[in-house]
Image: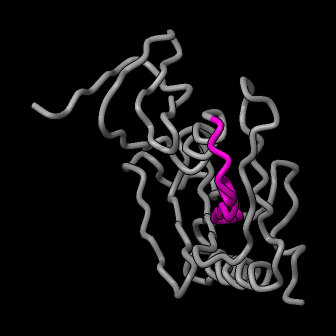
Amino acid sequence: PNLFVVTGSSVVQLGLQGWKVDRAITDDGIEYRADRFVVCAGAIGTPALLLRSNLDTPGIGEGIQDHPACTIALDLEPGTDVSAPMVSVLIDRNGSQILPLNHLHHAPGHGALIAGLLDVSSQGRVSLPHREGLPLVELDQLSTAADVAGLTDVVLDALRIAHLEVLEPVIRRAYLDSDGTPASSLGDD
């Protein structure tokens, strides 16, 4: 009885009475009043909403972090059975992960290894250059030496997996981008 939920509408601004939020204003101009509000607009939408609502508290939108990743595309050998459901097994490492995919629905004949860094130190920001406009997101990924080293380490481990002898009958080639840059071009240095 003390919860009111509205669906199919987005909050574009919060109304303030001093420092207290007393209403939420939706994209269709309706104002909803309440004693309490819970803001759950995500890592980008929440600071944008707070900034759009003229909250000028220092630090809003600062310190956003994301997980950089590198996808190593795998060209599978002809005849590799990809009719099975997509299979992935997460390889969880200290502060990073490798996600192997046995095939890709949108790219027949291909699989992937996705190497991602979870423990990051790089920090970015979300700002609102124009009150009515879209937020500006500056992730600033890989801006610290620790993040560069961490992603490099997990990508090299993913490459080692791609070149395991046991996978030779399945993987014809591993490459780094849509231009077909061979993964072997990275080398170990």
Question: Image point 32% across, 40% down: which residue?
Answer: 36
Task: Where is residue 29? Give x, y as percent.
Answer: 51, 10
Q: Which quarter of the image is occupied by the C terminus?
A: bottom right
Residue 143 visible in the current orientation: yes
Above or below, 9 against 148 in this view is: above
Q: Which quarter of the image is occupied by the N terminus?
A: top left
Question: Left or right: where does residue 184 sit relative to residue 111?
Answer: right
Question: Left or right: where does residue 143 sit relative to residue 34?
Answer: right
**Residue 106 vs residue 147, the one in the foreground:** 147
State the extent of the magenta-drawn residues as a range.
54-72
Name of the residue lying farthest toward the front: 18
Q: Quadrant of residue 20?
A: top left
Task: Where is residue 71? Give x, y as percent.
Answer: 68, 61
Q: Is residue 33 magenta?
A: no
Question: Image point 63% across, 70% down: which residue?
Answer: 115
Question: Left or right: where does residue 31 sit relative to residue 188?
Answer: left
The majority secondary structure of the magenta stretch comes to loop
**Residue 82 vs residue 117, the one in the foreground:** 117
**Residue 84 vs residue 34, the one in the foreground:** 34
Colour scheme of the rendered structure: one colour
Task: Where is residue 52? Give x, y as percent.
Answer: 65, 33
Question: Image point 80% across, 30% down: which residue?
Answer: 130
Question: Image point 34% across, 21% down: which residue?
Answer: 7
Task: Where is residue 73? Give x, y as percent.
Answer: 69, 58
Question: Left or right: where does residue 77 sit relative to residue 145?
Answer: left
Residue 74 visible in the current orientation: no
Above or below, 125 against 141 in this view is: above
Above or below, 102 against 149 in this view is: above
Q: Quadrant of residue 143?
A: bottom right
Q: How many marks?
A: 0
